[in-house]
Amino acid sequence: MSRPLRICLVGASGLVGSKVIEACVGRADVRLVAVARRELHLPPGARMEVLLTDPEHWGDAIAGARPDTVVSALGTTWASAGKDEQVFRAVDEKLVLDCARWGLEAGARQFVAVSSAGADPGAKPLYLRVKGETELALGRIGYPRLDVLRPGLLIGRRSESRPLERLAQLAAPVTDLLMRGRWAQWRSFRADQLAEVVLALAHERARGRFVHDRASMLRALKRQAYQASIAGTLAATVD
């Protein structure tokens, strides 16, 4: 039996990060280590390490995690940043890039970054422009494998209040039907499903830089399901 894949998770307290933790419960093929600035509420059955320290010391924590893969679910909002571009970039750009560099220095072969549909360094909205600029910078760091995930509206309950996002989530079943063609990338995506995408991609071996829109992420889930069915068939044959 091969050793478990060591995953270092940053951004563990947010919606996606918490779903990644839940998705790892009961899995023997993953050894999860979260790096966070405050205590986390862990789900029942979680068997993992949580390294608590301020972000300026995350480099040491990531090195201590000895990751094969670093997963970044880091992100803030324009409102949470006080509508200050420098504060916003400090998390969504600088901290993401710092964690990527620290991970590579620690020996990680892969970086998985949760970005956003519509990310583009030439976009007019600051949020999408910063996401696009960060993606470009990640591509220059030198990971053998880089996976950038671009979900649209995330469906799931957050710890903090986001009234407008909650309204968008309620309207998603209708608005998703209206999004066709190039707008399909903006369709909603369940946060728990996105966590499964993260774990599926972390187990893929191909080298390179991969940008995953909604359709690509769904294909990753199908590949995982197919591989699991093949493994189950082989196990039953041996038994």
Image (cartoon, rainbow, N blue to C red):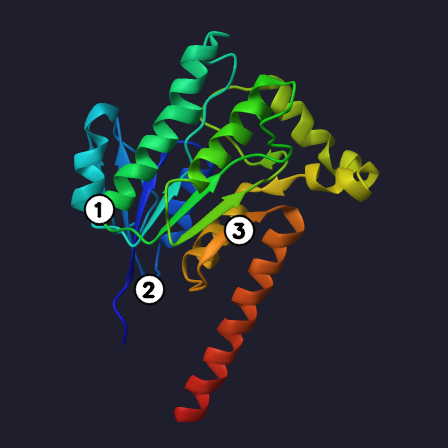
Q: Nearer the viewer, residue 208 or 39?
A: 208
Closest to the camera, between mark 3 and mark 2, is 3
Residue 59 screen position, x and y as percent: 21, 34
Q: Secondary structure at mark 1?
A: loop
* Quadrant of residue 101 within the rendered picture: top left
Q: Position of residue 152 (x, y in %)?
A: 63, 36
Dot 3: what SS? strand
Q: Which residue is mark 3?
A: 210
Q: Are marks 3 and 2 in contact (CB under 8 Å)?
A: no
Name the residue beneath numbered marker 2: 29
As drawn, is 190 to the left or to the right of 67? right
Residue 214 appears left or right of 193? right
Kind of residue sitting beneath label 2: Asp
Q: Is residue 208 above or below residue 102?
A: below
- 3D distance between C-alphas at marks 3 and 1: 22 Å
Classify mark 2: residues with Cα within 10 Å, few (<14), some (14-19) or many (20+).
Answer: some
Mark 3 is on which residue type?
Phe
| Earlier residue among tags 3 and 2 | 2
Q: Sequence-wise, which precedes: disc 2 or disc 1?
A: 2
Residue 4: % across, % down? 28, 63
161 or 186, nearer to the observer? 186
Q: Is 47 on the left or on the right of 71, as rendered?
A: left
**Image quadrant occupied by the C terminus:** bottom left
Q: CA distance from mark 2 to mark 1?
A: 21 Å
Residue under pointer 1: 106
Select label 2 or label 1 by which is in front.
1
Residue in view at x 83 percent, y 37 percent: 178
Alpha carbon of mark 3 to alpha carbon of mark 2: how far?
23 Å
The residue positioned 46% from the left and 14% from the top of the image is 80
- Residue shown at 56% from the left, 66% from the top: 223
Amino acid on which disc 1 is placed: Ala
